[in-house]
Amino acid sequence: MIREEQAMSKDGLTVGIDVGAEELWVAVGGRKPRSFTHSRSGITSLHHWVSEQANSGATIHYCLEATGVYGVHVATQLIARSGVTVSIINPAVIVAFARTRMKRSKTDQIDAELIRVYAEQQRPALWRPEPQALQHLTAMGAQADALKATLQQWENRGQTHQFVPQLPPVVAQTQRALVRSLKRQLNKLELAIRNLCAADADLAQQIALLETIPGIAMQSATRLLAYGGSRWHRYSARAMTAQAGLAPHHHRSGSSVDKKQRIDKQGDRRLRKALYMPALVGTVHNPCLRSVYQRLCGNGKLKKVALVACMRKLLVMAQAILITKTPFHATTLPLT
């Protein structure tokens, strides 16, 4: 099970919010859903309106879908208020819940009410914001990875220019200037990430622990922390595997349907990507991963399948080290 905070009490008012970039639709039991602007003043008005519907002293539980920065912005504004709890749920859960209720229409108002009913019936786990240092690490890591992807695209584009007949000089000049600029900004971000991790005691300790694992260096460690967040300590190993999209996916039914097993890939692909290179290096330099890789390959498994198994092993290994605060040791590693 996920080691989350206790879900909200049955007492109190449950509120569903459908979050948009410019508009928030709010559903309260017994009232027609109402819209508010997605702004600080709009969220304040939203809370005042909901408070009028609640009994004196009752806890207000807001529930909304995970909609990236939009949802986090709303949740952060609401959870800072007294007597408020917040849950953030996977949008796919609400889609499935709507099917169970045979909903054929989809509007923002309907979605807000569905979220409210789901929260009231299922009592989802409570959400809390990440520590500020971890929020900054996530933002900088994501920005650095986006720049790296853009840099790779422009470098690939530069490679093709040598085959363009009579390429105008201005094209080559702007190409080189863009690549230089992207490299400078990427180096600036990586330096900021290193400085942030050195300045924060918790991050520095966790980075040092992860770096004891053969195959994980500074950059991989920062990405694992950035994309795993506090889930490394709150989730079980099974839930963390699902979060990375590395859980096995089975599709069997009766005697006629038995599809090939594959990984689920419904988790955070950034976390999965952060595990790939360390696992690949670990198949050579990490004795735990090397033995798994060689055993599976020796049993006839494809190299890709064996590598995915090593990624799962590495994820559980990293989580065990972070939870126990014990450096890597090939013979005494717990929880794996």
Image: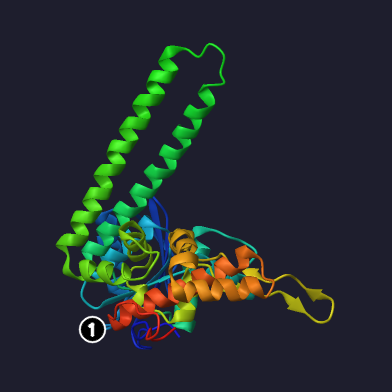
Whether residue 30 is visible: no
Q: Residue at x 39, y 44 (%)?
A: 148
Q: Residue furthest right?
A: 256
| Residue 43 pos. (x, y %) | 29, 60
In the figure, residue 163 lies in which quadrant? top right
Disc 1 crowd, CA 10 A, few/some/many (<14, 14-19, 20+): few
Whether residue 323 is visible: yes
| Label 1: element kind | loop
In the figure, residue 169 lies in which quadrant? top left
Q: Residue furthest bottom?
A: 10
Quarter of the image with the C terminus in it? bottom left
Give the amino acid at mark 1: Gly
| Residue 234 pos. (x, y %) | 36, 79
Quarter of the image with the N terminus in it? bottom left
Side of 64 where 258 appears, left or right: right
Q: Which residue is mark 1?
A: 57
Q: Residue at x 24, y 43 (%)?
A: 188
Number of marks: 1
Rendered position, 77 above or below 176: below
| Residue 200 pos. (x, y %) | 17, 65
Q: Residue at x 43, y 39 (%)?
A: 150
Side of 248 where 190 appears, left or right: left
Question: Which is nearer the eye, 106 or 167?
Answer: 167
Rendered position, 162 above or below 120: above
| Residue 264 pos. (x, y %) | 59, 68
Colour logic: rainbow
